[in-house]
Image: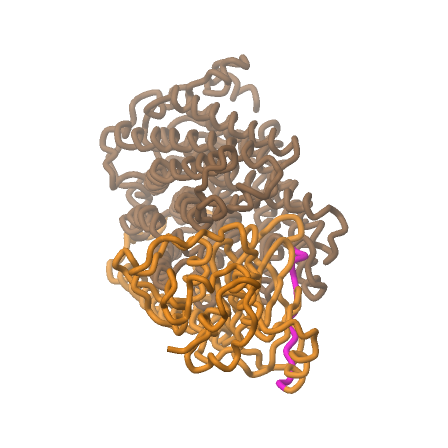
Amino acid sequence: MASRVDNLYFFIVAVTAFFAVLVSVLVIFFAAKYHTKDPLAVGQPIHGSIPLELAWSIIPFLISIVIFAWAADVFFDLQRPPDQTIEIYSVAKRWMWKFQHLDGQNEINELHVPVGRAVKVTFTSEDVLHSMFFPSFRVKADAIPGRYSTVWFTATKVGEYHLFCAEYCGTKHSGMIGKVIVMEPAAYQAWLTGGPGAGSLSQRGEELFNDLACNTCHRSDGSGRGPSLVNKFGAPQELANGTSVAVDEAYVRESILTPQVKLVAGYQPLMPTFQGLLSEENVMALVEYVKSLKTATSGVSNVSAAGPGETPPAAVQENR
Amino acid sequence: MASTAARRVTYLNHEHSVASWLLTKDHKRIGLMYLVVVTMAFFVGGLFATVIRLELATPAGDLLSSDDYNKMFTMHGVAMVFFVLIPAVPAILGNFVLPLMLGAKDVAFPKLNLLSWYIFVIGFLFTVYAMVTGGVDTGWTFYTPYSSRASNSNVMMTGLGVFITGFSSILTGLNFVVTIHRMRAPGLTWFRLPLFVWAVYATSLVQILGTPVIAITVLALAIERFLHFGIFDPVLGGDPVLFQHMFWFYSHPAVYIMILPPMGAISEVIACFSRKSIFGYSFVAFSSLAIAIFGFLVWAHHMFVSGISVYSALVFSFLTYAVAVPSAVKTFNWTATMYKGAIWLKAPMIWAIAFLALFLVGGLTGLITAALGVDVHIHDTYFVVAHFHFIMVGGAVMGFFAGLHFWWPKITGRMYSEIWAKVAAIIVLSGFILTFGPQFILGYLGMPRRYHVYPPEFQVLNVLSSAGASILAVGYLFVGIYLTASLFWGEEAGDNPWHSTGLEWTTQSPPLPHNFATQPVVTEEAYEYSRREIKVV
């Protein structure tokens, strides 16, 4: 993608440089050629030309359309990650970047990724606005409290690259920097398994799911007071107000923090709000757990224990 | 030479007391009073810029603390945007020459005009008070939730200054619109108006329609900050992106408040010193209105990575390209005006050509920032800093200086040193290019804006930029010195030193207290150099 952005950039630079040179040369040429020291001399009475006006309105407009369309095409691809990506969560806070790998690795102001694989970072902010900016990969998106943003990139060369905060966030804004460490796939695998075995992100999510007693209502067989969450992620969801919504990270997050806003059709507004009770990291663990609740994969991974005195975990993991 | 000037009654010498200035209803004196305050604000803003460029000469933050640096760029932006760029051309040059160009005695509401100045000064004093009692560190953009929740600096005092000043801008716009509609001399039809008047008219519409929105935004920010009523802060149930929509709904059109009047001044200067009618008069006139209208429809191009949808980004990118066309039309028409002209390269024309060069770069790099796929990368980097300085300083300030040099003999009755004025134009032009040219490269290489400390690989370009800034500062000081000197030692200018066709040149320099001895009557189009018998003075 970086080379596509650069190609577009140099194309626009070339087009604009042409017009800059054209106008500059004309201005200098006219100033030299028609220069006079006689203050009483007058110029020729030329008042204008409709064909010329049309030409220099329409031609720049058409060139603009070409730039617009090309740039929009690049933009679409920058905004839409491919299907197969390495997913990473991140939380921005003054003044650091926390990264959470699905396998359980945590990092602060460093992000390890393998070369040649598309990486998608889903992130939010815990306080004010920030902006996740990877100049080498030509991508950037604001971290907005209360929302999820994403950037994606594919690193093509092993090495270390800048990570900057690009949206002003206070005292240490310029210190809110980090680096992306791009590794060979084998080295990346070794790094992934090398850290402390904290358990995967979805395992942590599952623990939270049980500790917070989410599992008492969100039973996998749909018999609970809340909807089953199995196979929900990625599918459209009918809402109580008659509309429907695509179940993505943002919707899951919103449903945890402010459940009544987009209530699922057929259910009562019973769920308590978790706004202010969960850190963004814990919300992300829960989101990742909900994403992992798929028919195809369940039954293999989910055998962990529920909190004491709670409904049997089977309620969550069973297939239907 | 001073003795002959002193015998004529002018707006400057018919009354001398301090009260005769502070209570004046004369648009010319009010224009000069704006000049004094705006020059002070320019000096304050320039001082902050100097400190910023000094700090950035090295990658480490070794001159200031991070908090102080953040205050420097914030206060630089606040002083320059709200107290220099927005009022400079309309309130100084517009006030002075608009009634003269219309053949009128004054603006439509002279008392309101004086009130506008007082409101402006009060707003400025509030802002200065906020600056000296601790400053403000939000960036001139005041983005929430930082400004509403996190910042401990004088956010609301500064906001109050901006809020108050806005009313001055609204009232001035209102005054000018009514003046242009009602006070034109007999025979001065709409299509005989000088293009500066068209530009000020378009600007006034933006001032009237846009400025209330920034007032509403500041008020909403105050409500959230003081009453904790959630408007922008997500913790309180608000939306931080809403603030950006509201802020840019004013602040993007505000860019056109800054650049349209200088464009008008440039039209005057180029026509006069090419001794020709402006090429495509009606296209230049209507392009001002088109820019004013389209300018209201492009605000979200500041927000392509702020969390707006892909489809609204597409719409705003497209509209941004649409607004580029009238600016291109103006540029081509100015160039074509010089074709087969009789080009008299006096100082105002040199400043105007310098304007053209810088505005060209500023405008064309706008095509790069408007390109969605590229803007994702360059947004909030030095590329954007360079781009808007080329427009606002390279365009608006150069245009202001072109206009100031053009009308200075009319305003003061004196000529400045021609050679110094040309030298200063060249110093400012080269200093400017050296300051902001490298910033385009810095930005594309990825250096974010508002960085106190930066990676060492960016140092060479930053040193070049700081070196350029010192040349720029020398250039501006030159202008201040030779213009001030001209007041004391300048030659008498005469009524029409440029042999211009404009109505403002038909009265004496400096003008009579009530502008014209007899009511002028207009019988021809603007800039009719070829049909006019030029009077030798």
Q: Is residue B463 above or below residue B200?
A: below
Q: Quadrant of the C terminus of chain B?
A: top left
Location of residue B462 (image quadrant): bottom right
Q: Colour of chain B?
A: brown
Q: Is residue B79 left or right of residue B179?
A: right
For image coordinates 44% across by 70% down, the residue present is: A315
The image's colouring method is: by chain
Question: Which residue is most to the bottom?
Answer: A186
Looking at the image, which is closer to me, A233 or B159?
A: A233
Residue B130 visible from this viewpoint:
yes
Rendering colour (chain A): orange
- Rendered location of residue A43, percent (x, y): 36, 51
Q: Nearest the camera: B492 or B365?
A: B365
Residue nearest the observer in this picture, A143 or B153: A143
Taking the magenta stretch, the answer to whether it contains residue A273 is: no
Could you say where residue B445 lies in the image, as x and y percent from the top left? 60, 67
Q: Quadrant of the N terminus of chain B?
A: top right
For residue A33, say whether it is visible.
Answer: no
User: Does the stretch in magenta take in A178?
Assistant: yes
Which percent across, then down, holds residue B321? Answer: 36, 60
Q: Which residues are magenta?
A: A174-185
x, y percent for residue B69:
67, 46
A46 lies left or right of A97? left
